[in-house]
Amino acid sequence: MAVAAKPVHFAEAIDYLRRKLLVGTRAWTDVWQDAHALSFMVAGAMQEALVGDFHAAVTRAIAEGRTLADFRKDFDAIVERHGWSYKGGRGWRSRVIFETNVNSAYSAGRFQQAQRLKAQRPYLRYVHMDPNLTQEDSRHEHAAWHGIILPVDDPFWKTHMTPNGWGCRCKVQSLSARDLARYGFSVSKSAPEVKMVERRVNTPDGPATVKVPFGIDPGFAWNPGDPDTMPKDIFGR
């Protein structure tokens, strides 16, 4: 008799989302960088009830292992219920809301686990999900970071913990000294030099210039699970 698979309960990722405050915004730039660790927002969603419904749908997606297709059903129902007029096509907008929030929550959960287990598993490895990708739209900077191995507390992870941009699928892998020997890995001699570059972003108040690490999209140069930005009670401090 076939046994139905059950989703893995990722407690840290779920708690990360549940502890967030609901914030109404005009645009994605209204909540910047690590302020997302405390705030749940959907660009252009101003009403608390609307933001709350999206928050519940994303949290449910993680808790129940739901797919983007499942979330899109919730998206359609929420839009209809609130009469929300949003920018962009339905497919693109629903994907951005789903993937950005889910990927950030998973990243926060992974880093919290890494912090808790760093005495036994002291290293993180950057993993570009398709390091051989050669299409023009490939993130070559992310591919260049593939295989970097650094201690969990290295400052590199404060800015380069995944995701590092819209649609970024990069991940980190937790490693022990035994893992290094098993896979033939070695700890990187040093973190890559972080070169800051200026990028233009559009805000409701007009264009603005921001500085970000080269290769990282504006607004993503932060660590979702960093103890210095997370609510203190998550780490018991």
Image (tube, rainbow, N blue to C red):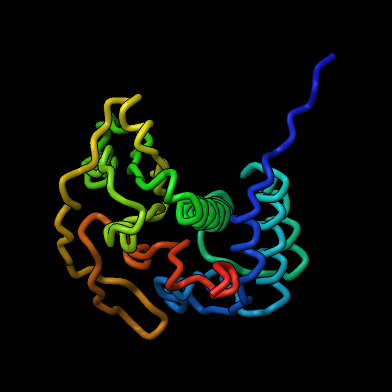
For the point 38% across and 85% down, which residue is it?
205
- Residue lying farthest to the bottom in this orientation: 205
Residue 8 in picture, x, y percent from top left: 67, 40
Question: With 116 as the anchor, is 156 left or right in this view?
Answer: left
Query: How many numbered marks have been drawn onto this rendered protein structure?
Result: 0
Determine the image quadrant of residue 70.
Answer: top right
Q: Nearer the viewer, residue 164 or 43?
A: 164
Residue 192 in picture, x, y percent from top left: 17, 52
Q: Nearer the viewer, residue 87 or 223?
A: 223
Q: Nearer the viewer, residue 170 or 182?
A: 182
For the point 42% across and 44% down, which residue is it?
121
Q: Nearer the viewer, residue 72 or 31?
A: 31
Could you tell me if residue 22 is visible in this image?
yes
From the viewer's perspective, is residue 134 above or below residue 139? above
- Residue lying farthest to the right in this orientation: 1
From the viewer's perspective, is residue 154 above or below residue 179? below
Residue 162 in picture, x, y percent from top left: 39, 52
Determine the image quadrant of residue 76.
Answer: bottom right
